[in-house]
C-alpha cells in the first residue's frame, strides 16, 4: 500500500505533465480575472511566472501603473522574502526570475496570488515540494486573502495534504473560478474538469486524464 507521501508525489508528477499548448490564450483569460480581483486591494503578493505557469506579466505592470504595491517572492534559504516588484528581472535558481532588488519588505499584504501544481479537496496547495510558500505563510502574523491560480486544473478528490500546506480562499483556472466553502472538503464538478481538459484523481478511478476519457467515450 502506497503512503500519502507517495500518492502526493505521484499526483505532483502527473500534474506537471499536464502540458498546456494555449498558454497565451489561457493566461489572457486568467489575467483578466486576477486583475478584477487585485484592483480592489492595495498591497499584493504576486509571482513571477515560470514557463509552465500563467503569464501574469501584463497584470503586474498594469497594477503597478495604478499605484498598487506589488511584491514578489525572493528566494532565501528554505523559504523566501517579499521584495518589491520592479524591473529588471534576473534568472536565478530553479529558473526563477527575481528582481535585482533584494530589500525585504515587512508590509502587511491584503492579497496573495499563488501558483499551484495541483490542489486537493481541502483547497490546500500541492506545489513543487520545496515547502517555500508553506514556511512563508506560516510566519505571517496576519493572513491575507489567498487565491490559487493554474492554467488547467489538476485536482485530487482524495486528501493528499496536511495542515502545514497552505489553504486558498479561491481557485482560478482558465474556466473555473471557485470559492472555498466553510466545510471540511469541497467538490469540484466533473463537468468543469472535463471542459478544462484537466486531470482528476479519485480513489475509485485513480489518475485519469479527462482528455483521454472524452476521446474514448469512457464513463
Image (cartoon, rainbow, N blue to C red):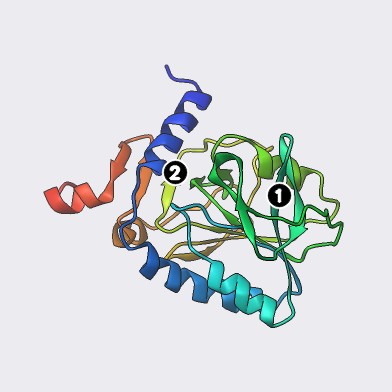
Whole-percent x, y for residue 86 in the image: 70, 65
In depth, the one of 21 and 117 nearer the eye is 21
* Left or right: 145 as drawn, with respect to 49: right
At 56% from the left edge and 40% from the top edge, which residue is drawn? 94
Residue at coordinates 14% horizontally, 52% vertically from top-left?
215
Q: Residue 2: horizontal and vertical position, in percent?
A: 44, 20
Residue 174 can be seen in this image: yes
- Quarter holding the N terminus is top left
Determine which quarter of the picture holds residue 196: bottom left
Q: Where residue 172 is drawn, which disc sits there?
A: none
Q: Residue furthest left?
A: 216
Q: Left or right of 213: which side holds 25?
A: right
Q: Residues within 10 Å of mark 1 (few under 14, many from 20)?
A: many
Few, some or many residues within 10 Å of mark 2 (<14, 14–19, 20+): some
Residue at which label 2 appears:
157
Q: Which residue matches tag 1?
A: 74
- Helix, strand or loop at disc 2? loop
- Of 11 and 182, which appears nearest the observer? 11
Q: Is residue 44 above or below residue 52?
A: below
* 187, 106: nearer the viewer: 106
Residue drawn at (34%, 55%) of the image: 20
Q: Is residue 125 above or below residue 30?
A: above
Amino acid at each position: 500500500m502506497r503512503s500519502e507521501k507517495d500518492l502526493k508525489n505521484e499526483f505532483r508528477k502527473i500534474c506537471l505533465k499536464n502540458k498546456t499548448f494555449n498558454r497565451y490564450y489561457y493566461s489572457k483569460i486568467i489575467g483578466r480575472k486576477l486583475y478584477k480581483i487585485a484592483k480592489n486591494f492595495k498591497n499584493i503578493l504576486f509571482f513571477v511566472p515560470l514557463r509552465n505557469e500563467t503569464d501574469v506579466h501584463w497584470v503586474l505592470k498594469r497594477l503597478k501603473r495604478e499605484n498598487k504595491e506589488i511584491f514578489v517572492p525572493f528566494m532565501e534559504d528554505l523559504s523566501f522574502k517579499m521584495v518589491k516588484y520592479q524591473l529588471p528581472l534576473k534568472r536565478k535558481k530553479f529558473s526563477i526570475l527575481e528582481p535585482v532588488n533584494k530589500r525585504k519588505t515587512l508590509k502587511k499584504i491584503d492579497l496573495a496570488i499563488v501558483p499551484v501544481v495541483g490542489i486537493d479537496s481541502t483547497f490546500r496547495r500541492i506545489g513543487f515540494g520545496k515547502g517555500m510558500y508553506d514556511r512563508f505563510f506560516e510566519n505571517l502574523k496576519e493572513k491575507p486573502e489567498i487565491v490559487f491560480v493554474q492554467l488547467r486544473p489538476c485536482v485530487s478528490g482524495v486528501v493528499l495534504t496536511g495542515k502545514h500546506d497552505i489553504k486558498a480562499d479561491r481557485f482560478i483556472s482558465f474556466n473555473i473560478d471557485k470559492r472555498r466553502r466553510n466545510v471540511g472538503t469541497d467538490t469540484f464538478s466533473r463537468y468543469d474538469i472535463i471542459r478544462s481538459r484537466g486531470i482528476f484523481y479519485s480513489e475509485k478511478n485513480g489518475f485519469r486524464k479527462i482528455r483521454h476519457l472524452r476521446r474514448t467515450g469512457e464513463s
